[in-house]
Image: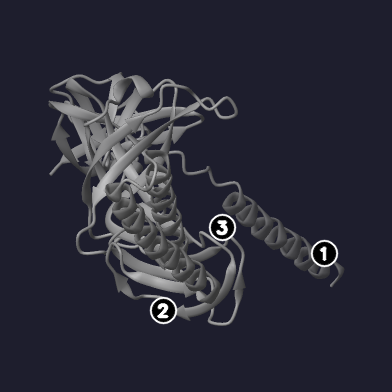
Amino acid sequence: MKMTREKNFLNRVALVLCICGFLAGCSDAPANTSGVAEGGTAGPASEAAVPARPVHVVNVVTEEIRTVTMRDMLVLPGETEALHDVRLAAQRGGVVEWVGVTEGSVVGTGDHIARIDLSALGAARDRARANVRLAEDQLLRRRELHAQGVLAREELEQAQNELTSAVTRLREAEVEYGHGTVSSTLDGVVNKVHVDPGEFVAEGGPVADIVNVATMRINFNVPEGDVRFLAEGQKVTVLVDTYPERQWMGKIDFVAWKADPATRTFQVRVVVDNADGSIRPGMIARAAFLRRLIENAVTVPLFTVQDKGGERIVFVELNGVAQARSVELGVIEGDRVQVLGGLKAGDRLIVAGHTEVEDGTKVNVR
């Protein structure tokens, strides 16, 4: 009985050892070093596929650079003025008796604008006329007496001198009487009336402003470095800010010979025909003066020039690749700028897509 229990115990130990050995064999299975995934087919690890990185290509539009003739323009601001603009003044003081115009009235040369009280002047003129008539009568009587031989020649000559003096005083009185009436000295429009009836005006005091806007003038201050390009009679394009859709052709009327010591500029006056009266005094105007013509100039659109860290860059296309070119810029005309260096005629300038490329970017020209 004892031997039977020992035998059963040994059998159990042997069974446990067998199970442990089986489990150990399973856990120590060799790793898959064949490069094949579980359940996959055989193949070496060195032949595993790596996806290629795509090449970035930018669609662009180009234009061939050609040389052109450029106009080097100088554009300056100014203020319009009427070429003929006068302020009428009272030639003698007195009370304003009558005003015959209002602002906006159209007047001609010699038209009466206002009149000063003429009562005192009229009385002085009437006295002068009476003195002339008296002197004429006296001269007539003395001529008769001289003819009769009862009057010396000296007395006859005295009568003639008295008549001459009386006529002179009458003319002076008539001139003074005429000074009481203020008349227009040019054809134009009344811009402002400074007096009203019943108001006292001093001698030399303003009465009315008359302007003639048929011809306008504009004064410009030209830098001393540019005045050498300008001459009297030169044609000038004039733009008025109030009328952005219009332009006028003016002419240089005067170029100052002496610079303004404060600004070191020379005054240049331009006259413009304004028959329709569109331009009014005090409007802001700009004049485009032609400095010179530049032959065989290389130009590019302004929008193609980029600022890269203070350096001016444009892009050209060469053999399907974008190339950055550092350029030196010159004068501007309209929407194009002169290139002094960095480009030449025949280069293919990128004008669309230029903001999406860098130096060396592959491009597709459309």
**Location of residue 107 by image quarter:** bottom left
Residue indicated by mark 1: 6
Q: Position of residue 254 (x, y in %)?
A: 33, 32
The reply, left or right, for residue 169 in relation to residue 336 is: right
The residues bearing labels 2 and 1 have C-alpha atoms spaced at a distance of 147 Å
Where does the image place residue 6, in percent across and percent down from the top left? 82, 64
Quick one: SS at disc 2?
A: loop
**Residue pictured at 55% horizontal, 47% vertical:** 29
Callout 2 environment at 10 Å: few (<14), some (14 to 19), or many (20+)?
A: some
Q: Amino acid at mark 1?
A: Glu
Location of mark 2 (residue): 102
Residue type at numbered disc 3:
Gly
In the rendered structure, find residue 204 and report the number of the disc placed on it: 3
* Front-most of residues 50 and 234: 234
Task: Pick whichever, 205 or 82, lies toward us.
Answer: 205
User: Is 170 placed above or below 70 here?
Assistant: below
Q: What's the distance in space between the residues labelled 3 and 2, CA to CA?
A: 20 Å
Name the quadrant containing residue 358. Answer: top left
Answer with mark 1 or mark 3, whichever residue precedes in sequence: 1
